Image (tube, grey):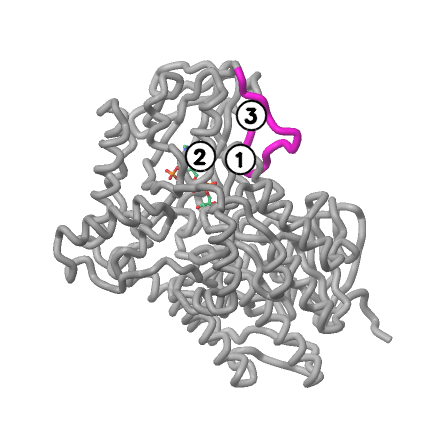
Amino acid sequence: MTDYDFDACVIGAGFAGMYMLKRLRDAGFTTHVFETADDVGGTWYWNRYPGARCDVESLYYCYSFDEELQQEWEWSERYPAQQEILRYCQHVADRYDLRADISFSTTVESAIYSDDTRLWTLRTTTGREVTARYLISAVGCLSAARVPDFPGLDAFRGETYHTGQWPHEGVDFSGKRVAVVGTGSSGIQAIPAIARYAEDVTVFQRTPNYSVPARNRPLDPAEQAKVKADYPRLRAEARMTPAGTLAEPTGKSVFEVPEDERRAELDRRWENGGAAFLAAFADTMLNVEANEFSADYVRGKIREIVRDPDTAEKLTPRDYPLGAKRICVDTDYYATYNRPNVHLVDLRANPIETITPTGIRAGGTDHEFDAIVFATGYDAMTGPLNRIDIRGTNGQRLRDKWSAGPRTYLGVATAGFPNLFIITGPGSPSVLSNMIVSIEQHVEWVADYLEYLRDKGFTRVEAALDAEDQWVDHVNEVASATLYPKAASWYLGANVPGKPRVFMPYLGGVDVYRGICDDVAGSDYKGFLLQD
Ligand code: NA7
């Protein structure tokens, strides 16, 4: 007889929550998942904007935990479109009958821990209250969509959209004048797709981004079969790379390579497409001069592609290193500015003053629109957790504990919040890797941990404060040895006014991180306080 409802409750039914449910259920834990949406998919449920596509290749942006699953699913393109990833998630949910243990259209409002019972009590928007021994967050890193607080926003009489909360029935922009605010990965994908059928598109750009071509194409069945025949080896190899991807790093400093070969290496990667461009040289993210070589190459490409020199200049990133904001992977992004129906407003020179009932006023000029698309990003990593009222020991709120920036041990646990595990939390390498590789690693590690706790009879587990302090220092130390903190990115929280600037992801690499986690597990979970 248990005196609680579930061994574990999981928040979120995206890739992380679905696999967590499967693993825990297989291990004999009673598990329940709460999900805001009315189906599985997480990011890929919400991000239905035109052009939405993953920038990791299909054959690797999928689970590897079940050989049959990875063999049976057929991908149609090199990079998967949102609809195809969502269909894949739905297939996974069907295949393992996951929906039976998921409450959809249900948002967890609060999760409160009691040391008397060593249980979490969750309250949901549907009025449900459940108790669980363990609480596992699978809320994702980029799920708290953000529209900046522009004055006049409510007065706009046209349609407004955020890329991360796109209407499921789709949007017809034909014959419409559309504004797109934001030129991160979402904007860079959406702009060419919207420009193909809208009457007119005006892009409002605050910071120009570095983008490399995707070179998306249909997947050749023979190529797919070849990868699948070698899947176990390729997956194992990818898991042991820093980013969890087979980016074929040269491993060489740019300075070791003769100048003409350097350029040839970048030409090859540019033609081949994808974010592997960044892996051309080992020191691109470590040394400003090395970075400049690749950054300058992209600047040259922008000048080559964009016909109007003034527009090309505005689109050229200059004041931060390539890759320090997540590199974008596009289809026809720069070339889109050659279309007569696409215009660019540089917000550095002409800041948005107000949204008006008919459009946007920037730099003293009124622009009229039928629709505004906000591709303005997310309150990343901490946002999705902080909007839930999570309280640990002595009633401490997680958002208070993290008011000066998130603090975790290994990204998976935080002192003062016993029996809480976070998948892809701040302090984990998640967002700087192939998310699926990180998710599988985290889920398996947490599931193994829960089995260990059950086998040993422990009912309370908490990250030790000193272990957490050391991990936070380590995360900072690794980040400050790189060029990543040199851009005002969402990795740093810099996109949200007032958010503390702390570099949130762990930059040590998923390979190194996996080793550290395995070492912690192998030493009876050092750094955690366990009680029976
Ligand atoms: P991003 O990458 O955070 O991009 C958001 C964009 O919106 C970026 O260009 C921002 O400019 C811009 N932005 C944000 N706030 C404002 C305001 N107030 N005014 C003007 N422009 C603004 O979000 P995405 O959704 O594109 O991508 C998120 C991740 O999803 C991506 O990195 C991949 O991992 C997948 P800024 O650069 O801050 O000046």
Q: In the figure, 351 relative to 132: above or below?
A: above
Residues in magenta? 161-174
Q: Report x, y in % for residue 505.
A: 43, 59
Mostly what secondary structure, the magenta segment? loop
The residue that disc 2 covers is 187
Q: Assess mark 2: CB under 8 A from ligand 1?
A: yes
Q: CA distance from mark 2 to mark 1?
A: 8 Å
- Residue drawn at 31 percent across, 44 percent down: 271
Contact (Cβ within 8 Å) of mark 2 with mark 1: yes
Q: Nearer the viewer, residue 245 or 311?
A: 245
Picture quadrant of ligand 1: top left
Number of the label disc, if any, that sits on residue 160: 3
Q: Quadrant of residue 444?
A: bottom right
- Residue drawn at 67 percent across, 67 percent down: 23
Identify the mark nearer the N-term, 3 or 2.
3
In reply to whether residue 163 is colored magenta, the answer given is yes
Q: Report x, y in % for residue 521.
A: 54, 80
Amino acid type at mark 2: Gly
Amino acid type at mark 3: Thr
Q: Report x, y in % for residue 419.
A: 65, 70
